[in-house]
Amino acid sequence: MSASTQEEEELPANHTGPKGVINDWRRFKLDSVDQTVPQNKRELLRQMSSPREDDRERLNRKMSAQEYELIQEEDERCLKRYRKQCMQEMHERLSFGPKFESVYELDSGEAFLEVIEKEHRLTLVVVHIYQHGVKGCEQLNSCLDCLALEYTNVKFCRIDAVATGAAERFSAEVLPALLVYKAGELLGNFLSVTKHFNEDFFATDVEGFLNEYGLLPEKEFTACADDEDEGGDVE
């Protein structure tokens, strides 16, 4: 085997270009193929995924009608899993900054200032100032719990108005309040934020409100979103 052939054999997955994408898909199909698939189809998948020297010329052309038929006959969920894997890998390569998956409780004004001033410069910080017993505060806390799972690169925090050390500025009349910061700069200051929502509001309402002001980044890719589409058509 020549050096160039050996190098080609050892190329990792995740190639770029049309041929690389097709070969990555073939390998993925082989790894995920159901054992109930007939032997002749499994053999074809094997040839598609790990071509021998005599298979190489055939696989360097466009996919044949037989290969397309095999892909179409297989469960389309396999294609969804492949797309999901590619999206996750792309996201990992393009993601910057720390990750968060929950709402952080701040217990003092010092902690409040620290999260604003010392957080990573690329991290968006959303702070909910609340007070027990004030209408809408508990519901907004629940909404932020949900959003923290979907926007893991956003740091969601909450702090009791009394703990801020500036309770006179955050009276019950202006609560719940949402403050949005990035790199120490105040981007959004929303007092009595629930006046923008219906009496019964949900995480999607809060998300939509923040998006209206262009404050939220692109939503993280999540398995939940993929599961919801499980029964839908593949584009």
Image (cartoon, rainbow, N blue to C red):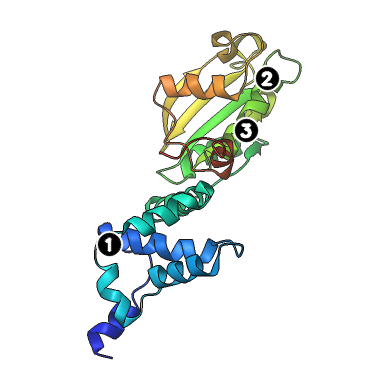
- Whether residue 207 sits left or right of residue 131 in the image: it is left
Q: Which residue lies furthest to the right in this view?
A: 133
For disc 2, the marked residue is 137
Query: Residue 149 lies in what quarter of the image?
Result: top right
Q: Looking at this view, is 109 or 172 the one in front?
A: 172
Q: Tell me where residue 34 appears, x and y as whole percent.
A: 58, 61
Q: Residue drawn 61% across and 9% down? A: 198
Query: Residue 206 lies in what quarter of the image?
Result: top right
Disc 2 vs disc 1: Cβ atoms closer than 8 Å? no
- Whether residue 45 sits left or right of residue 150 in the image: it is left
Q: Which of marks 3 and 1 is in front?
A: 1
Q: Residue drawn 57% across and 45% down? A: 223
For disc 3, the marked residue is 146
Mark with earlier residue (3, 1):
1
Which mark, by number, is residue 19? 1
**CA–CA distance between discs 3 and 2?**
15 Å
